[in-house]
Image (tube, rainbow, N blue to C red):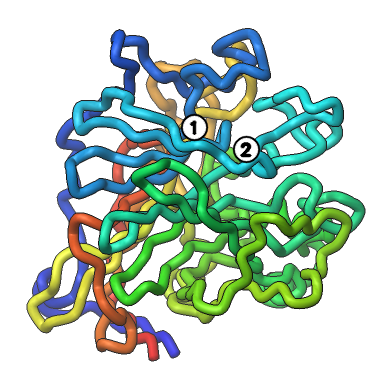
């Protein structure tokens, strides 16, 4: 059970957070100084089959040697970089995850209807974490593979994949199924039926954003829908149905490296998914009308004065830029939830709208106080913490203060 009460006492006791500042920026680059770029391969390279320096960075985890592993949606890929941002190596990806057309041609840009196998477009690795001993990495896809669902359509399935990697070799050593919450359960939390998620939204508009391993071997996973304040909905008008953190375990889950889920939403006989239990219902704590669209990062912060822990969730603001092709991209300005908004040329100041000042969509940090050993289990060592900020773009930071969260 989770409850949220009024915060009392000092920030050290309550978990309230403020004063976040951008300290520095690290640019990702090749050894020759060539920079990685956020444009997709078609725009950057003029070739949808060549990944090159295109990167849609999502998860980040620090190794004990100071290097960083970063996961990418375009590939999907996992890269290792030095602390100064210099590229070290790329991990070898399982063939079933790489997007290909029917004739086997690589295509890192297009989606269903063009690609026949592999990850869905813009649905690659959203989360990445490293085990306590530093030997293993776990990456999680945002949604099911493009053809792993009823009618060979992953957008209809609940079954997405977690991939385990040996860090020393950079090769995959296992794949496991994580099951999204069924859309019927999510729809039951949305007033009326006009805004319900359809069959085709199950594995497309509902997905996973991050994964963080705790030292006892369990993981925390952010699962969310695609609604809330963001570049596509700058006043947060959409009806939110799911913003949750789940605790999962891989113990007893079936390695599905050589198992295809094409053509069905039902797991084959004998295939056991990861176990899963609700850890934190963010929507219930902060209110559906106050949740940003893309909750994409999770980490534990300091130990508080009463012995509890701070838990931080961070959103991705997509750099407050519309997601159309380059000629049509705009900065997104908003006055916030239920307010007003405007699109402007990139770099132009945000205007007054109906007499109300707007600003770029902020990155939001939600701070919670987590109390009780049963709530946290064994907390990860600092070297294994992973703060996953998709795109790493901060256009202002808004911190939302919340009270005590107890989870039994």
Report if the CB atoms under discs 1 and 2 are less than 8 Å apart.
yes
Residue under the point 82% across and 37% down? 116
Residue under the point 38% across and 39% down? 70
Instruction: Residue under label 1, please give it.
Output: 56
State the residue in front, 300 or 69: 69
Residue 236 x %, y %: 55, 51
Describe the element under mark 2 as helix, strand or loop: loop
**Tag of residue 365:** none
Vertical relation: 400 (above or below) 71: below
Instruction: Residue under label 2, please give it.
Output: 122
How far is disc 1 from disc 2 in space, using C-alphas?
Answer: 9 Å
Q: Earlier in the sequence, mark 1 or mark 2?
A: 1
Vertical relation: 258 (above or below) 349: below
**Residue 308 falls in image quadrant:** bottom left
Q: Residues within 10 Å of mark 1 (few under 14, many from 20)?
A: many
Q: Is residue 358 visible?
A: no
> Where's the C terminus, which quadrant?
bottom left
State the residue in front, 218 or 313: 218
């Amino acid at each position: 059970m989770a409850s949220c009460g009024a915060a009392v006492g000092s920030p050290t006791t309550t978990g309230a957070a403020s004063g976040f500042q951008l300290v520095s920026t690290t640019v990702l680059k090749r050894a020759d100084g060539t920079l990685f770029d956020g444009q997709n391969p078609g725009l950057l390279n003029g070739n949808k089959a060549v990944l090159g320096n295109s990167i849609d960075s999502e998860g980040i985890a620090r190794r004990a040697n100071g290097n960083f592993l970063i996961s990418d949606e375009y590939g999907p890929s996992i890269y290792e970089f030095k602390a100064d941002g210099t590229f070290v190596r790329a991990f070898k990806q399982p063939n079933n995850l790489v997007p290909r057309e029917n004739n086997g041609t690589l295509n890192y840009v297009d989606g269903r209807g063009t690609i026949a196998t592999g990850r869905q477009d813009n649905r690659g690795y959203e989360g990445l974490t490293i085990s306590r001993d530093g030997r293993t990495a776990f990456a999680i896809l945002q949604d099911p593979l493009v053809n792993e669902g009823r009618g060979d359509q992953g957008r209809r399935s609940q079954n997405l994949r977690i991939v385990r990697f040996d860090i020393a070799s950079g090769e995959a050593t296992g794949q496991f199924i994580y099951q999204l919450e069924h859309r019927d359960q999510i729809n039951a939390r949305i007033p009326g039926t006009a805004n319900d998620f359809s069959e085709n939204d199950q594995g497309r508009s509902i997905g996973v954003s991050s994964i963080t391993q705790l030292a006892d071997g369990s993981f925390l996973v952010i699962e969310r829908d695609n609604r809330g304040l963001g570049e596509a909905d700058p006043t947060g008008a959409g009806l939110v149905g799911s913003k949750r953190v789940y605790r999962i375990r891989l113990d007893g889950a079936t390695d599905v490296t050589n198992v295809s889920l094409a053509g069905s939403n039902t797991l084959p006989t004998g295939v056991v998914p990861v176990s899963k239990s609700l850890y934190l219902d963010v929507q219930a704590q902060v209110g559906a009308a106050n949740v940003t669209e893309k909750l994409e990062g999770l980490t534990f912060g300091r130990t508080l004065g009463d012995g509890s822990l701070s838990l931080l969730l961070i959103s991705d603001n997509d750099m407050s830029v519309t997601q159309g092709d380059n000629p049509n991209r705009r900065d997104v300005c908003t006055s916030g939830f239920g307010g007003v908004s405007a699109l402007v040329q990139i770099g132009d100041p945000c205007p007054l709208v109906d007499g109300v000042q707007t600003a770029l969509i902020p990155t939001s940090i939600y701070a919670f106080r987590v109390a009780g050993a049963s709530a946290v289990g064994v907390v990860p060592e600092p070297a294994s913490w992973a703060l996953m900020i998709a795109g790493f773009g901060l256009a202002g930071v808004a911190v939302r203060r919340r009270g005590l969260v107890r989870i039994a």
